[in-house]
Image: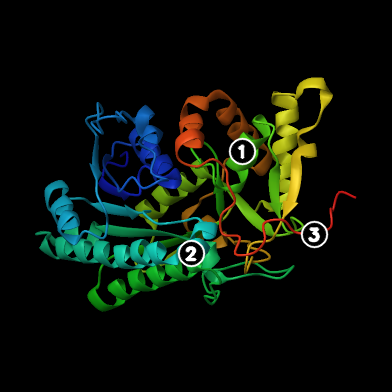
Amino acid sequence: MRYAKKCIVTGAAGFIGSALARLLLKETDAQVLAIDKLTYAGVPESLKEAGLDPATLESSNPRLQFIKADICDLERMDAAFASFKPDAVFHLAAESHVDRSIDGPGEFVRTNVSGTASLLQAALGYWRSIPGAAERASFRFQHVSTDEVYGSLGAEGLFTEKTPYSPHSPYSATKAASDHLVRAWHDTYGLPVLVTNCSNNYGPYHFPEKLIPLAIINALEGKPLPVYGTGANVRDWLYVEDHARALLLVNEKGVPGETYNIGGRNERTNLEVVGAVCATLDEMKPRAGGAKYRDLVEFVADRPGHDLRYAIDPSKIRDELGWRPREDFGSGMRKTVRWYLDNEWWWRPIREKRYSGRRLGAAAPIRAETPDPRR
């Protein structure tokens, strides 16, 4: 039987939330209540192919509803639960950009910590009201988090579900706090929860403040491609549609109270990532006169408290639930660059009206005298 739950997806106009909503509506029989506050990074156009009219927020898809609401508003959340009567909650609403958390940590505390507590209270009240024991037992509150809660790795080792938390930025600290809240609602009240911690996502509809879409768009515009420090920081990259499929699998087969780490096993330095963007663009959209996009790379002051390396061990979700990513870094990068080349209608208004590409979270002089690893 195809997955046919009634699902609330918070942060549904964001990058990962919209990928999950599109997957649910395209490949399952689920009904989706999409909830998003539509902050600067909430882009309703990301749900256009799922049937949402970005102008009116009305849906032509009978399986999709959209509510513009703040998860901190407990009254609105209570009403949403009571009206929609979900079988599952995928909680992705969060402030997510580390640089912005350095500039303005208060909003991260409000949304990621207080907002999660509000949503947990709404879910708990609704869950307790479900009349049938079997229906209560099948309910799931699924919290989507990050590998950044674990802190920084050295040159060796991998994050596992047992790795102690050691967050180093306001963003990762607030996500760590929200993880602890979710587990507390399970241990204290019995709410059936699932927690996932993922590595860096990339792919279509990625808001262009993040490394890969910023590099693609800057390159297309002939602007500098900023690389923090020497570009030696390492991240594990996960194609967003692979992540969405993993979230669905955890919801279907995961054990309440458990945590599942989701990673692509695609470690790359930031400089290698930007280099891959450049090489792919050189092939797909060569610069005039034979110039190379890599010539646009510019090293800038490092991010304060920049973690050296993240890398996830996905053995648990692989061995217990059977998940494996469909894309490696090469194939995912080609799909990503191709999407940005073909969908300027989506990113151009963001670039012009919401985020121009300016540096955020510097907390230091923007330029840095750093060695150029290419020399």
Q: Which residue is drawn at 74% across and 67% down?
A: 155
272 vs 169, nearest the viewer:
169
Vertical side of 212 occupied by 232: above or below: below
Q: Is mark 3 on a helix, strand or loop?
A: loop
The answer to whether one can see residue 327 in this image is no
Q: Splitting the image into 4 quarters, where does residue 144 fall? A: bottom left
Marks 3 and 1 close (CB-CB < 8 Å): no
Amino acid at circle 3: Glu
Coordinates of residue 140 in the picture (x, y in percent) = 29, 58
Residue 369 marker: 3
Give the residue type that dot 2 points to. Answer: Tyr
- Image quadrant holding the N terminus, namely top left
- In the structure shown, which secondary structural element does the residue marked by tag 1 occupy? helix
Q: Which of 258 and 233 is in front in this view?
A: 233
- On the image, the x and y values in percent for residue 186 come to 30, 72
- Residue closest to the far front: 365
* Viewer-nearest of discs 3 and 2: 3
Q: Which amino acid does label 1 sit on?
A: Gly
Q: Residues within 10 Å of mark 1 (few under 14, many from 20)?
A: many
Q: How many labels does the image show?
A: 3
- Counting residues from the start of the chain, the first of labels 3 and 2 encountered is 2
Residue that label 1 marks: 332
Say which residue label 2 marks: 171
In primary-sequence order, the first of circles 2 and 1 is: 2
Tell me where residue 180 sits by quadrant: bottom left
- Badge 2 crowding class, 10 Å Cα cut-off, few under 14, some 14 to 19, many 20 or more, is many
Residue plotted at (55% across, 74% down):
163
